[in-house]
Amino acid sequence: MKKSLLNLALIGALLPATLMSHSVLAQDRPLLETTGVSQIQVEPDMAEIHVEVSLSESDAKAAKAASDKAVAAFIERLLKAGVAKESIAAANLNLQPEYVYLKDKAPELKGYRASRSVTVLVKQLDQLNPILDSALIGGINKVNQINLKSSKEAEMRKQARQAAIEDAKQKASELAAGFGEKLDGVWSIRYFDQGPVRPVMYKAAMMAEGAINQSYEYGQVTFSDRVEVSYKLRD
């Protein structure tokens, strides 16, 4: 037992020295630090919509029933339109009391507001307007957000990452040559995973029925990446 404790103590004493030695080597060794960046844009072919029903009734039970009815009817229409069940997600009910505030009087209970949101992944953009129209005709009264997406996200992220790597390599090579130096391999790599930037096509707190029927500029989905690389220079 004492021998094991002694070994652990020796390892603990040597570890800071090893780290310090590595740090000193990094400071003494000539290094060239570069940052590789990339940006790839693609046309969206999918959309994720966030819609909501928000309504008030005189009592909590009625508010819940009306909210649940609107959501259930919308989901049924989505399924009939061919939207897969796994592409639909309905949130839990949010029920809040509503009060009327009068001067010099205690607040009076007016009723209850029930809210439920539904998220739908639309895998074909030509279905977007019909789905939004379907939402608005059956009790859904808010379109909170529409995010454009690409079905090729994994492939595009891989391409963006490789492009950032190539950018770092090219910068390092050009900088070294410009200063009359030669690269001697990679010393360290720092990578920061970047998610895709999805443009928001439409956002509104309240939409009147039929307001969706118009054309939109969909924009593009941007995939960017970044990598920091330290190269060794030949002595």
Image (cartoon, rainbow, N blue to C red):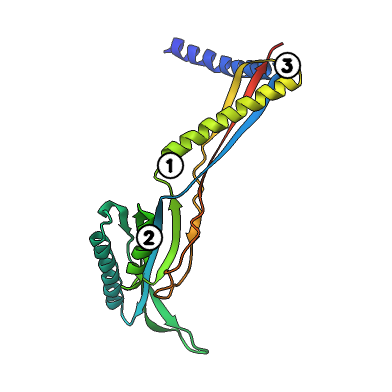
Mark 2 vs mark 3: in front: 2
Q: Which numbered disc covers residue 181?
A: 3
- Across the whole image, how many numbered discs are drawn on residues? 3
Left or right, residue 30 beside residue 1: right
Q: How crowded is mark 3: few (under 14 residues within 10 Å), some or many (20 or more)?
A: some
Give the residue number, with chain letter if any, for mark 1.
153
Q: Residues within 10 Å of mark 2 (few under 14, many from 20)?
A: some
* 63, 165: nearer the viewer: 165
Q: Distance between the residues labelled 3 and 1?
A: 39 Å
Q: Which numbered disc covers residue 17?
A: none
Amino acid at dot 2: Leu
* 23, 216: nearer the viewer: 216
Left or right, residue 181 beside residue 92: right
Name the residue at 25% across, 66% down. 72
The earlier-in-sequence mark between 2 and 3 is 2
Name the residue at 75% across, 22% down. 178
Residues at discs 2 and 1 in contact (Cβ within 8 Å): no
Q: Quadrant of residue 67?
A: bottom left
Q: Can residue 186 be seen in this view?
A: yes
Amino acid at dot 3: Glu
Amino acid at dot 1: Glu
Q: In this view, does 107 lie above or below 70?
A: below
